[in-house]
Amino acid sequence: MNRITARFDWLRRQRQKGLIVYIGAGDPDLETTGRLAPALEGVGVDVLELGVPFSDPLADGLVNQLAAQRGLASGTTPAKVLATVAALRRVSRLPIVLYLYYNLVHRHGVSAFVEQAAAAGVDGLLLLDLPPEEADAYDALMRAAGLCAIYLVAPTTPAERIRTIVARASGFVYCVSREGVTGMQPQVARSVATLTAAVRAHTSLPVAVGFGISNPAQAKAVAAHADAVVVGSAVVQQIARWGKTDELVPRVTAFVGELAQAIRSP
């Protein structure tokens, strides 16, 4: 069974909500990414999203854009990200999703990339800019490789399009809590309850909510409506703050541990 599916099955049996954390691969370097991932698993992360650096990350706000720049500056490439995942698989069973833009996959060759991702130990792909209407070949390759195809649903997505999107999705459905790009926000979007209900009307897949969740209190509030909470920019900001210091891993894991505790506390 795919590790993402297995993890959500376990969470459901335990009646717990999941924590999905995004970090930029290669930020500040891939050696740090390789140390940080198992440490995050140890403090309660259920799924790790690794952002593959790209020169034009149009769905991302400033914090994650700068992370992509640092990843590119450290020499991170899609092939090196896959090698890092393969190395992680020797020490960790943490489900891993690659968060990336279609240009990178297309240039590599879609079939070859999917096959190599599966061989490296990746569990799912989230292609930010691949419309579901153009994803037939991609979806077939993903199913054949046993990988989860993660799709996004936004507050502005009409009901009929939600039905189309979730019919293609596997692993979980990623609900974008607000319009716009990634980034921290002072409060949780009011649309979370409505959006998760609209998605659940068309699928039994777990529903994860992200974009704008910045602290433990917000994570707890979103977990009341979602099966999993996605936190990215707030974690990436911690990575940027501590840079290449010896404090990076303990500081980031302490912050993420607080998020996990908030989500799972009564």
Image (tube, rainbow, N blue to C red):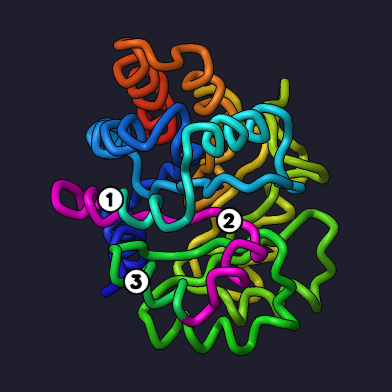
Q: Residue at x 58, y 39 (%)?
A: 222
Whether residue 196 is situated above or below residue 219 in the rendered picture = below
Mark earlier in primary sequence (2, 1): 1
The percent coordinates of residue 199 (x first, y second) are 66, 66
Query: Mark 3 or mark 1: which is in front?
Result: 3
Within-10-Å neighbours for mark 3: few <14, some 14–19, many 20+: some
Q: Would you say residue 102 sits in the magenta stretch?
A: yes
Q: Quadrant of the N terminus?
A: bottom left
The image's mark for residue 103 is: none
Q: Quadrant of the C terminus?
A: top left
Q: What is the secondary structure assignment of the residue under circle 1?
A: loop
- In the rendered image, is residue 175 in sight? yes
Q: CA distance from mark 3 to mark 1?
A: 14 Å
Q: Would you say residue 165 sits in the magenta stretch?
A: no
Tell me which segment is drawn in magenta: 85-111
Please give the residue where the numbered disc 1 appears in the rendered image. 94
- In the rendered image, is residue 204 in sight? no
Q: CA distance from mark 2 to mark 1?
A: 19 Å
Please give the residue where the numbered disc 2 appears in the rendered image. 100
Q: What is the secondary structure assignment of the residue under circle 2?
A: strand
Q: Amino acid at mark 3?
A: Ala
Please give the residue where the numbered disc 3 appears in the rendered image. 118
The percent coordinates of residue 4 (x first, y second) are 36, 62
Whether residue 201 is situated above or below residue 167 in the rendered picture = above
